[in-house]
Amino acid sequence: MNGDGASGFDPEGKTRTRDELQARLDLVNLARADMLVSIHINSVTENGTCDKIARNQTYSNDEPAWGTTAPQRLAQQVQAGVVGALAPLAPYERKDRGISAVNLFIVAPPLFVTTPDRPDPVKHPRRGALMPAVLTEVGSITLVAEQDLLLSPAGQAAAAQGIATGLGRYFADRPLAVRYDALIVGRAAAPGPG
């Protein structure tokens, strides 16, 4: 964060937007969240022209310190849940773009030092996600019918249910988790599933 306390869009660049994203990452890290799911709706353009297409895609962090297995599994479950929930409601073709491991700001791992590949710390979070993180594009607004579906209560409920289904499957398949709060003096914790 640049410390000016401002958020929102900066007319001179994206610094304030990144401050806002960094604050979100800081919040989930402080909360010791089990995972981060960032929900988006895509606007598909190619060479400045809107591509009238409906599609889902989910991105996961590509190089967390603990390995890529958990974020990829989370991305697969969320993607499958959203695709499965929205497909029956769409009277048009929707594309399943699958999952991709990328280093987008909200799903990036912590950047503790700059490297030759990442010389600009403003483009990468200083305190990235300390848990599996995914960014899911539940649909795209460049196709009018898709936009109408995503604006409808039924479409929003289906997208939310798809994400919830994916999270349920992710947690059901997850091995026992570590309870860090058990290390806090005076807190009793018993092991539990997931």
Image (spheres, helix red, strand yellow):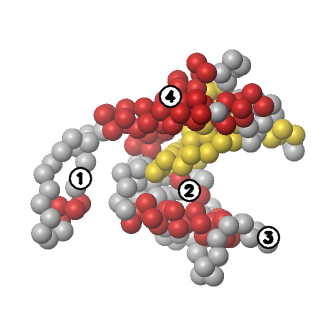
Q: Residues within 10 Å of mark 3 (few under 14, many from 20)?
A: few
Q: Is residue 54 above or below residue 61?
A: above
- First in sequence, mark 3 or 2: give its number: 3
Q: Secondary structure at mark 4?
A: helix
- Residue, x 25% and y 48% (percent of image)? 177
Q: Secondary structure at mark 3?
A: loop
Query: Which callout, 1 or 3, points to the residue nearer the camera?
Result: 3
For residue 63, the mark is none
For residue 106, the mark is 2
The type of residue carrying mark 4 is Ala
For residue 80, the mark is 4
Could you tell me if the residues under marks 1 and 4 are in contact, i.e. CB atoms within 8 Å?
A: no
Q: Give how far apart the Cα atoms at labels 3 and 2 are.
A: 21 Å
The type of residue carrying mark 1 is Val
Q: Give how far apart the Cα atoms at labels 3 and 4 are.
A: 38 Å
Q: Secondary structure at mark 2?
A: helix
The residue that mark 3 highlights is 11
Query: Which callout, 3 or 4, points to the residue nearer the camera?
Result: 3
The residue that mark 1 highlights is 178
- First in sequence, mark 2 or 1: give its number: 2
Query: Which callout, 3 or 2, points to the residue nearer the camera?
Result: 3
Could you tell me if the residues under marks 4 and 2 are in contact, i.e. CB atoms within 8 Å?
A: no
